[in-house]
Image: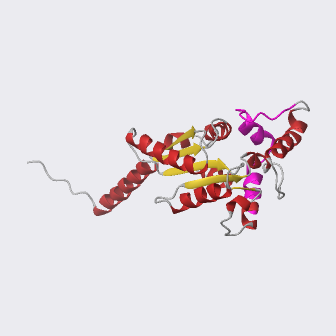
C-alpha cells in the first residue's frame, strides 16, 4: 500500500493564495469595454488610435469594442443598450463597461440633458463621455486651456492654428481623419488635455444644466480610464 504523503499546512495555504490570485487574474482578463459613439468615423477613429497605443498586453487582458452609429442623445443611449444586449448574446462574457460618446451640437437642450441624466440613473450606470459643443474640443485641450464658448467652425480653425506650426501651413483639418490621435500624441499632450478638461469640469460644479456647459467635455474620463489599464 502506497504511503500517504502529508503536505505541510503552510504549503496548502500558499497554494490556496496562489489559486485565488490565479482566479482573480483570469477574471481581470475578461474585462469587456463597449464604446458606442454618435459619430460614425471621427470618434471611432480617435479611440481606435488610442486603443492600438495602449501598453503591451492590455488588449490581451481586455476586450475593447468601438462602434460608430450615426445616432444622437436619447437614440444613441437606446442603440448602446441594444448593442450591449446583442454583443452579450454572441459573446462568452458580459459587457463590463458601457460608454456612450456624443455631442451637444444643435440638439434641443432637454434631449441633451435628459440623455446624460438617463445614463447616470441607469442600472447599471452607462458611462457618458459627452462634449459641449463638439468632440473637437477634446483635441484643442491637448494644446491650451479654452474657457470661452465656441462653435464648430471655431474648433476647426483653432485645430489648424495649433497644428500648422508642426505639420505645415497647408494643413487643413479633416473631420473623419484617421490620423488625429497620432497627430495629437506627437504634437500635443494627452496629460494636458486631461488636466484642462478636468479644470473645465470643475467650473460647473454639480450643475445639471449640461446644455449650458460650454465649453466642456467629459471625454477625459474615458481616456483616463483607458490609459490606466494595465
Bounds of the magenta segment: 171-199
Estimate the x, y position of residue 148 in percent, counting from the top left: 84, 57
In-front residue for pair 188/117: 117
Specify whether residue 33 is in view: no
Q: Is residue 201 left or right of residue 34?
A: right
Residue most extreme to the bottom: 206
Q: Quadrant of residue 110?
A: bottom right
Say if the magenta span includes residue 173.
yes
Front position in the image: 113 or 99: 113
Is 121 above or below relative to 86? below
Q: Where in the figure is residue 187, as x and y percent of width and height? A: 81, 41
- Relative placement, left or right, of 126 versus 101 is left
Q: Residue at x 86, y 39 (%)?
A: 160
Picture coordinates of residue 151 (x, y %)?
80, 49
At a point 68% along the width and 38% down the height, the residue shown is: 42
In the displayed structure image, the side of residue 7 where residue 37 appears, left or right: right
Amino acid at each position: 500500500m502506497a504511503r500517504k504523503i502529508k503536505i505541510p499546512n503552510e504549503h496548502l495555504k500558499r497554494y490556496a493564495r496562489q489559486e485565488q490570485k490565479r482566479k482573480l487574474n483570469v477574471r481581470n482578463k475578461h474585462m469587456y469595454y463597449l464604446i458606442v459613439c454618435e459619430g460614425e468615423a471621427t470618434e471611432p477613429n480617435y479611440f481606435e488610435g488610442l486603443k492600438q497605443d495602449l501598453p503591451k498586453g492590455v488588449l490581451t487582458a481586455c476586450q475593447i469594442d468601438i462602434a460608430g452609429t450615426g445616432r444622437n442623445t436619447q437614440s444613441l443611449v437606446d442603440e448602446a443598450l441594444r448593442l450591449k444586449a446583442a454583443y452579450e448574446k454572441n459573446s462568452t462574457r458580459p459587457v463590463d463597461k458601457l460608454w456612450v460618446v456624443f455631442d451637444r451640437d444643435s440638439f434641443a437642450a432637454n434631449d441633451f440633458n435628459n440623455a446624460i441624466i438617463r445614463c447616470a440613473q441607469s442600472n447599471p450606470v452607462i458611462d457618458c463621455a459627452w462634449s459641449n459643443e463638439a468632440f473637437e474640443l477634446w483635441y484643442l485641450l491637448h494644446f491650451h486651456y479654452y474657457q470661452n464658448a465656441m462653435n464648430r467652425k471655431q474648433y476647426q480653425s483653432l485645430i489648424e492654428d495649433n497644428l500648422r506650426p508642426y505639420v505645415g501651413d497647408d494643413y487643413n483639418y479633416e473631420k473623419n481623419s484617421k490620423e488625429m490621435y497620432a497627430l495629437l500624441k506627437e504634437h500635443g499632450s494627452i496629460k494636458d488635455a486631461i488636466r484642462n478638461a478636468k479644470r473645465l469640469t470643475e467650473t460647473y460644479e454639480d450643475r445639471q444644466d449640461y446644455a449650458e456647459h460650454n465649453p466642456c467635455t467629459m471625454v477625459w474620463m474615458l481616456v483616463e480610464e483607458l490609459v490606466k489599464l494595465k
